[in-house]
Amino acid sequence: MNIRQVKIFDIPFVSENKETILKLMDDRIKNQEKTYVVTANAEIAMYGKENKNYFDLLRKATYIVPDGIGIVKGAKILKQDIPERVPGIELMTDLLSMANENNQSVYFYGAKKEVIEVMVKNLLIDYPNLNIVGYCDGYNNDEDDSVTNEVIRLNPDYVFVAKGCPLQDEWINQVMAKVDKGLFMGVGGSFDVLGGFEKRAPEIYQKLNLEWLYRIAGNPKRWKRSLALPKFVVEVIKEKYKG
């Protein structure tokens, strides 16, 4: 199936709604096709623009999903269309629902030990048929090789990695070269939310596309990261008028 894409900084974002994206992923899982998913907001897009190594990793992704209203607005500035933002945590939970329904296997890697352990307990309550074949925290990078070997041995259908950008993407690309199947997705801080250690923004913030503001209000240390959005807008405008 051909998918529509929109390029921002030569990074190809999927220009489909969440329902279509999930259908694409479901088909690939059932066909045992290797799939690399990146959920990218304005901050990640800027990092890709400014860092060639990370840009090269992004270009290897099967799907780059617009996780952030900045990406949707950036596409509009470039007179292109992205129908909606697709938050990474929503995509992850929808995929977990599919895995739960289809008896597909799942592996989790990342976050702190106490976070991932509580998250796994919570998920087994929410998704009682979920086949969790393994998990490991992500705070000892020396374990990367042992986790890689475990994932190769277990050969799960889904691997969710919460080690932050760019570490999660670097690890995913290394492992994908050694396996025959599986959907690999970097999920940033989603384990903390699913483990109950962080709260997602209330629904009103989600509907108004102001989750970023809620996160800053709850953790003022994030304000530096928020500067990526206005910088992103400036760079998109430059791209619109270049040449």
Image (cartoon, rainbow, N blue to C red):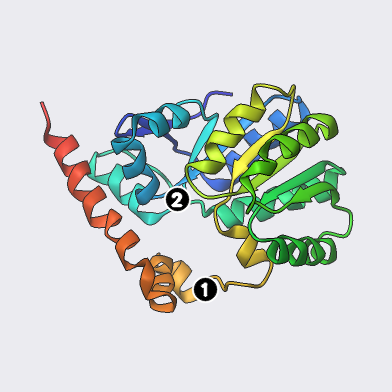
* Residue in the foreground of this view, choosing between 78 and 116: 116
User: Residue 81, image x and y in percent?
Assistant: 35, 41
User: Residue 239, image x and y in percent?
Assistant: 18, 35
* Residue in the foreground of this view, choosing between 46 and 206: 46
Residue at the image position 18 percent from the left and 48 percent from the top: 234
Tell whether 105 sits left or right of 46: right
The residue tagged with tag 1: helix, strand or loop?
helix
Q: Type of residue at label 2?
A: Glu
| Residue 189, above or below 6 | below
Residue at the image position 33 percent from the left and 53 percent from the top: 70
User: Residue 56, image x and y in percent?
Assistant: 42, 26
What separation in Å lies between label 2 and label 1 (alpha carbons)? 16 Å
Q: Tell me which numbered mark, 2 or 1, is placed earlier along the sequence.
A: 2
Q: Residues within 10 Å of mark 2 (few under 14, many from 20)?
A: some
- Tag of residue 64: none
What quarter of the picture does the C terminus occupy? top left
Q: How crowded is mark 1: few (under 14 residues within 10 Å), some or many (20 or more)?
A: few
User: Residue 103, image x and y in percent?
Assistant: 87, 44
Q: Type of residue at label 1?
A: Glu
Residue on which the image places disc 2: 84
Residue at the image position 64 percent from the left and 50 percent from the top: 140
What quarter of the picture does the N terminus occupy? top right
Q: Are marks 2 and 1 in contact (CB under 8 Å)?
A: no
Residue on which the image places disc 1: 203
Tell whether 86 sits left or right of 130: left
Residue projecting furthest to the front: 142
> Where, by quadrant of the figure, is residue 8 drawn?
top left
